[in-house]
Image (tube, rainbow, N blue to C red):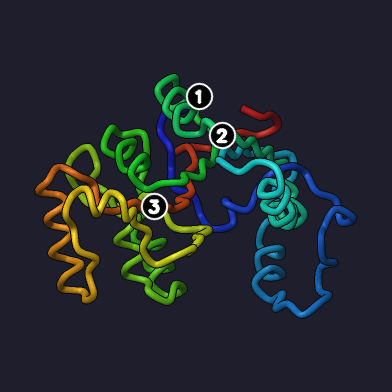
Amino acid sequence: MNKTLYAGVALAALTAGMAQAQDLKFPIGEGAFNWDSYTAFDAAHDMPGESITVFGPWLGPDQELVESVIAYFEASTGIDVSYVGSDAFETQIMIDTEAGSAPNVAIFPQPGLARDLASRGFLTPLGQETADWVLANYAAGQSWVDLGTYSSPEGNPELYGFFYKVDVKSLVWYSPDNFADSGYEVPTSMEELKALTDQIVADGGTPWLSVWVPVVRPAGPRPTGSRT
């Protein structure tokens, strides 16, 4: 049983249950899509009989949506992928990693938890090749690399995950009541925002909460023929 997690490649994030052609939301090659990357990946990967487990926070309609994307990975590779969602993800991933029964891929809803697991040696870094891919393919590449980079148990900065899905519902949320109680003024410039951030930290608060979805999988050979 593996206790070490490894931040997986992009397509490893798109996995969850053996899909046949009729299960695909859009027929391959049809519709207003650019299928070049899919067909190239399809031609280079043929791994029938293997299986992957994926654990994440998505349930209900969100789970249905991600599984509709995952189906293309399965159709391309022949890999049987099982996705399990949980509204207690944060608690369960800690239990599973500490018990040595981590999933192949875990989708974290917040970077802080992934950072903590990385510092304890439960995550394996992706390496410079993946960092270069993020730099080349994400509009603000360096920022996304920085957000997925944490200290290893040895204190070395390593890329442990990257963003698969980001919901920007507002640039900044704040509580007017909390601001009033603390005597904070709403900032109107970046300089004032930085000063307020420093003040909240000095007052013992946590000024920012970010949400991310790094993808991780266990180090070592992938399991074949069974779900673990």
> Mark 2 sits on what residue?
87
- Disc 1 crowd rating (10 Å Cα; few below 14, some 14-19, many 20+) is some
Amino acid type shown at disc 2: Asp
Foreground pick, 85 / 189? 189
Seen in the picture, residue 228 relative to 192 is either above or below; the reply is above
Quick one: SS at disc 2? loop
Seen in the picture, residue 58 relative to 76 is either above or below; the reply is above
Amino acid type shown at disc 3: Leu
Give the spatial CA distance, label 2 vs label 1: 19 Å
Quick one: SS at disc 3? loop
Foreground pick, 100 / 172? 172
Snapshot quadrant of residue 25: bottom right
Camera-side mark, 2 or 1 = 2
Q: Earlier in the sequence, mark 2 or mark 1?
A: 2
> Mark 1 sits on what residue?
101
Q: Earlier in the sequence, mark 3 or mark 2?
A: 2
Camera-side mark, 3 or 2 = 2
In the image: residue 99, left or right of residue 224: left
Camera-side mark, 1 or 3 = 1
Give the spatial CA distance, label 1 vs label 3: 20 Å
Seen in the picture, residue 5 relative to 226 is either above or below; the reply is below
In the image: residue 187, left or right of residue 10: left
Q: Earlier in the sequence, mark 1 or mark 3?
A: 1
- Disc 3 crowd rating (10 Å Cα; few below 14, some 14-19, many 20+) is many
> Mark 3 sits on what residue?
126
Q: What residue lies at 9% left-to-right and 48% top-to-bottom?
A: 202
Q: Residue furthest top?
A: 99
- Disc 2 crowd rating (10 Å Cα; few below 14, some 14-19, many 20+) is few
Mark seen at residue 191: none
